[in-house]
Amino acid sequence: MHVANQGMVLLGGAMIAGLLAALGFQGVGDPAQVAGEQIDNSQPVGFPGSVIETKAVNDAVNEAGKFAGHEKCVDCHRTEVKSWMASKHSTRAFDLLRTSENALDYAESLGIAPGEIARSSLCLDCHASSKNNSDHTPGVVPSVTCESCHGGADGEDGWLNRHAVYGTRSTSRQQETEEHYLLREEFCREAGQIRSSQLYEMTKRCFSCHVIADEALSEAGHTHGAGFEYVEKSMGEVRHNFFLKPDENLKVATLWLEARQGEARTAAGRLRVMFLLGQMVDLEVSLDSLSGGTEENDYTDELIGRIEDAYELLAEDVVEELEPEEDDPGFAEIAATVGIVEPIYEALDEDGFDPENKDVYSKAAREIALQAKKFAKRNGKELSAIDELELFSDDEFDGVYRPVESRIEKR
Ligand code: HEC
Ligand code: HEC
Ligand code: HEC
Ligand code: HEC
């Protein structure tokens, strides 16, 4: 393992803010102020000693053994790192565990000792990332990191080794052959990288943290993150881009737009796919979570509410509204998803939650997953009819950091 620093220092929001200030990162929220500033390249952006020692860490989201850390990305992805450092995934997700009264309440209900909350509890699954310390003990990284979303990168077989290698030593990205590009993408994908072309896996990552799939945690009072609409939630502070074509990448990952990823890709098409896919994945994750319920309670009520909302949106606001032909290829997976959920929706409406139906819920979730994976490969062109329904906002990017120049195109 390459560990940037072994210091066991706990980093809080104040220190992060201090670091940002030291980097000249002021005027967060006002892109104009940030744009064009000069950064000292000799100074790595990172948290010195951002590793906390801990007894045991859940590995659900991040494979500890593969954790590289944003320090390994910053040389090439300075812009992304800066955006991320100003986002709540970096500044607040972990701090909540140590500073919020609610955190103590939830932990108490679950029998987690206060001292364990930020060290070895299930809370870390979603509020932190995990890594192995150099002495092989599990460590906590106090934020939702790049790799929480893009997949653990490190290790001999890790994707970081091939991620930015375009051929023989002197080959630049512009010179990379199509064949090499495809092999590289495949290698990285198999090694667990989640890129903008894997929209299903990416969407699933968001929902796996933003839907609470744990009845006890939910009953302990933990918020449910109701109404996580994927387009809206990924457009704001989470937005960060690398290929900087300012007019386009406000709305879409510019790497996804590249012709070699597939034909006919546009920002408008991508947004349509993201919006509808978000509803499908919400249905999948909510139904799967519902199968873990034991009785009718706040947990199952929340999930049923989500299922009803997403179903009604797809069935009533999209399919009934547009009446696509039965064989309209554009809407095949949406129509199939509506068909899968319809009987469950009706049964929930009539009889409410039934623990006897666990298998029905989880089977439906698996079937929707297959549809969603297929749907995620679309370019969104055939879905243009949904634009007139104005189901989602395509407001201007309102993130914290808007870069103005491309680093990569200057290479
Ligand atoms: C040596 C430079 C370099 C390093 C180090 C690096 N990257 Fe990249 N990354 C690139 C380049 C160049 C691209 C765009 C080219 C491509 O993949 O085709 C890219 C693209 C990406 C993409 C977008 C892929 C897509 O298609 O959407 C992600 C995600 C990414 N990097 C994440 C990371 C993370 C996370 C780290 C640190 C663990 C990292 N990178 C480290 C150079 C680098
Ligand atoms: C909360 C999840 C999340 C985190 C944390 C995150 N990313 Fe991303 N990243 C995404 C998503 C989602 C996209 C694709 C955006 C889209 O589809 O329009 C993306 C896209 C990218 C791209 C491609 C942008 C383009 O223009 O094509 C790069 C490069 C990247 N991320 C690097 C990073 C690095 C480096 C970090 C850490 C500093 C990081 N990401 C942290 C979710 C995340
Ligand atoms: C490892 C778990 C995890 C993953 C993966 C994750 N998030 Fe988060 N996210 C959190 C936590 C924890 C917070 C902190 C909430 C707070 O500050 O109130 C948060 C906060 C946010 C916020 C700010 C609060 C809000 O709701 O406006 C947004 C936006 C967000 N996440 C979007 C996303 C998107 C989009 C993705 C996927 C691309 C994603 N998240 C992936 C755990 C995660
Ligand atoms: C499945 C992922 C997940 C787990 C596990 C999890 N959280 Fe959260 N937590 C989140 C997300 C996502 C948010 C942001 C919710 C939002 O903004 O909609 C959040 C928000 C919070 C908040 C701020 C909102 C509030 O309710 O005051 C606190 C505090 C919190 N979590 C504490 C905890 C504690 C303590 C644990 C462990 C007992 C825990 N969380 C476990 C995902 C999770």
Image (cartoon, helix red, strand yellow):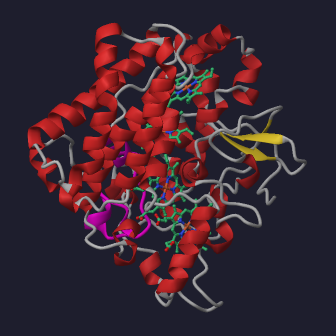
| Residue in view at x 75 percent, y 62 percent | 155
Left or right, 389 with reference to 295: left
| Residue in view at x 79 percent, y 60 percent | 2
Say if residue 115 shows up in the picture.
yes
Residue 17, position as x, y percentages in the image: 55, 43
Q: In the rendered image of this protein, does residue 358 appear above or below residue 136?
A: above
Residue 61, position as x, y percentages in the image: 62, 41
Left or right, 223 with reference to 249: right
Report the front residue among 106 and 92.
Answer: 106
Q: In the rendered image of this protein, does residue 54 appear above or below residue 103?
A: below
* Residue 361 covered by magenta stretch: no
Q: In the rendered image of this protein, does residue 52 appear above or below residue 274?
A: above
| Residue in view at x 73 percent, y 37 percent | 10
Q: For the N terminus, which image quadrant?
A: bottom right
Question: Which residue of the protein is positioned furthest toward the right in this rendering?
Answer: 135
Res. 270 image quadrant: bottom left
Residue 151, position as x, y percentages in the image: 60, 54
Q: In the rendered image of this protein, does residue 391 appear above or below residue 345?
A: below
| Residue in view at x 57 percent, y 83 percent | 166
| Number of marks in the rendered image | 0
* Residue 243 covered by magenta stretch: yes
Report the front residue among 18 and 351.
Answer: 351
Say if residue 24 shows up in the picture.
no
Report the front residue among 257 and 346.
Answer: 346
Residue 248, position as x, y percentages in the image: 27, 65
Res. 312 image quadrant: top left
Left or right, 351 with reference to 320: right
Magenta-drawn segment: 230-254
